[in-house]
Amino acid sequence: MFLAHFAVAMAAKKLTPKTNLGLLFIGGQFLDLLWPFLLLLGVERMAVDPGNTVLTPLDFYDYPISHGLLSVTLMSLVVGVITFVLRRDRREATVLAALVVSHWVLDLLVHRPDLPIVGNDSAKLGLGLWNEPVIAILLEALFFATGLYVYYSGSKAKDRTGTYVPAINFVMLALIYIANIMGPPPPNEMAVAISALGLWLFVGLAAWGDNHRLWGLGKL
Ligand SMILES: [Zn+2]
């Protein structure tokens, strides 16, 4: 999924309002933020394969570290422990660890069976909703709308940055999702890796914008 990962992170802000949204984005998108580095290092591989599923022209045939269940579970524990050691906030650590795992669970819904349990020779899982475009798109939209609602109903802008930066960030995410599903397939694997690196931009924008919003108000 794409928007849903960000949406879950936005909604998680309600559970741990002190945590900056940029950090929550890192939790929710941890696997996809790590993935381009593994691609560029040649540790994991993928192929541009138009028609692989109806919605995604990518064949994720080798990514046991970024998207293997065992590896993701271990990374989630590591993220939780490191967060706790650095910040001494059990709730924040638990939420971030849960966000890491949430990515795999959401991916499970849409991927064809290409999510390995351990390595590439192990069983691979995926419920394949990317081949049911209407359901997959509605699901992404529903998640995104819910995430936006929770984020905006629990916070208010301190200044113009707090108004415009999150708005630009969320609109850009929605536009990228639409471009991904409607546009032509990427020209090659390198282009996919480079554009996946661009996900870090949204982490930066989220961190910046969230610093300019007040939490713990109104419906929180
Ligand atoms: Zn993913």
Image (cartoon, helix red, strand yellow):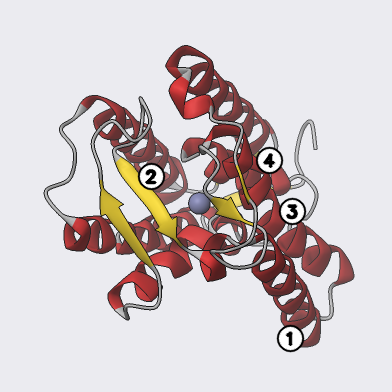
- Alpha carbon separation for disc pair 4 and 3: 10 Å
Identity of the residue drawn at 88% across and 70% down: 90
Q: Nearer the viewer, residue 166 or 110?
A: 110
Q: Position of residue 184 (x, y in %)?
A: 15, 33
Q: Position of residue 67 (x, y in %)?
A: 56, 60
Mark 4 Cβ inside 8 Å of ligand 1? no
Q: Earlier in the sequence, mark 2 or mark 3?
A: 3
Q: Amino acid at mark 4?
A: Ala
Q: Nearer the viewer, residue 191 or 203?
A: 191
Mark 4 vs mark 3: give the one in front: 4
Residue position marked by numbered label 3 in the rendering: 17
Q: Earlier in the sequence, mark 4 or mark 1?
A: 4
Q: Position of residue 48 (x, y in %)?
A: 24, 48
Residue position marked by numbered label 1 in the rendering: 86
Q: Examine the image and state in which quarter residue 109 appears.
A: top right
- Alpha carbon separation for disc pair 2 and 4: 16 Å
The answer to whether marks 4 and 1 mark residues whose Cβ atoms lie closer than 8 Å is no
Q: Amino acid at mark 2?
A: Asn
Q: Visible in this render: residue 156?
A: no
Q: Earlier in the sequence, mark 4 or mark 3?
A: 4
Relative to 92, does residue 144 appear above or below in the rendering?
A: above
The answer to whether marks 2 and 4 mark residues whose Cβ atoms lie closer than 8 Å is no
Q: Earlier in the sequence, mark 2 or mark 4?
A: 4
Quick one: label 1, few (<14), some, or many (20+) residues within 10 Å? few
Mark 3 Cβ inside 8 Å of ligand 1? no
- Mark identifier at residue 169: 2
Residue position marked by numbered label 4 in the rendering: 11
Q: Earlier in the sequence, mark 2 or mark 1?
A: 1
Mark 2 Cβ inside 8 Å of ligand 1? no
